[in-house]
Amino acid sequence: MSVRILTSVGEAVRPHLDALARLRIAVFRDYPYLYDGDMAYEQRYLEAYARSRRSVFVLALDGDEVVGCSTGMALADEVPAIQQPFVERGMVLDEVYYFGESVLLPAYRGQGLGHRFFDAREHYARSLGGYRWTAFCAVERAGNDARQPAGYRPNDVFWNKRGYHRQDNMFCELDWTEIDAPAPSSHRLRFWLRPLDA
């Protein structure tokens, strides 16, 4: 497979937004997010990133098809639910660059694209200047969750290898509708941090 990486900043990603919305819905439908995708929500979410002058989209393209994407945005431009755990810790929002998500179709996994996503976002954060930290959050499920598929492995080992540290006291709560659920519910996500110059 010949996959090329394209880095887009802010408004430059606009031609790809619908494809990114569909990709997020497809990937997050799987465990552990079990997200029952909503195109209208996705468009609003991605629009906020596109409008930010300090956002980045790292796209994985197979020909003209978007098969993966990784996003980042200045934490100061994020929603209050994402910012609050940093405020409570006394961290300066303008010193943190926040990574939104990395989504990749299953057929393209295991080829090093996850590392390329992180490399590109970390490089972009450095290029902006003034950032001391990169951070992201990820949903946590109970170890005995009956919906966990056989052979499932969390990304903790990969994130640790990238220098990210699991935070024991930094969480946020976000709402989404799970597959077959009648309404949205709240989900706890844990933050992972890395000093940018580590």
Image (tube, grey):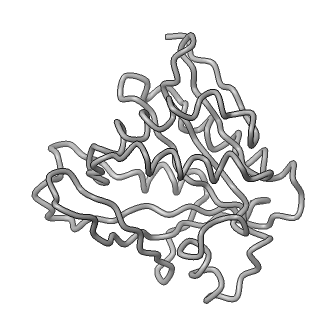
Indicate the quadrant where residue 116 lies. top right
Q: Is residue 90 above or below residue 5?
A: below
Residue at the extreme left: 146
For the point 50% across and 63% down, the residue is 137
Judge left or right: residue 105 versus residue 46.
Answer: left
Judge left or right: residue 178 versus residue 120.
Answer: left
Q: Nearer the viewer, residue 40 or 167?
A: 40
Judge left or right: residue 172 versus residue 61.
Answer: left
Image coordinates for residue 109, horizontal then vertical, percent: 42, 29
Q: Nearer the viewer, residue 119 or 56?
A: 56
For the point 66% across and 39% down, the residue is 57
Image coordinates for residue 2, horizontal then vertical, percent: 55, 11
Q: Is residue 138 above or below residue 119?
A: below
- Number of marks present in the image shown: 0
Image coordinates for residue 181, horizontal then vertical, percent: 16, 58
Where is the C terminus found, in terms of image quarters?
bottom right
Indicate the quadrant where residue 142 lies. bottom left
Residue at the extreme front: 40
Q: Is residue 162 above or below residue 109?
A: below
Image coordinates for residue 59, horizontal then vertical, percent: 61, 30
Q: Nearer the viewer, residue 65 or 11?
A: 11
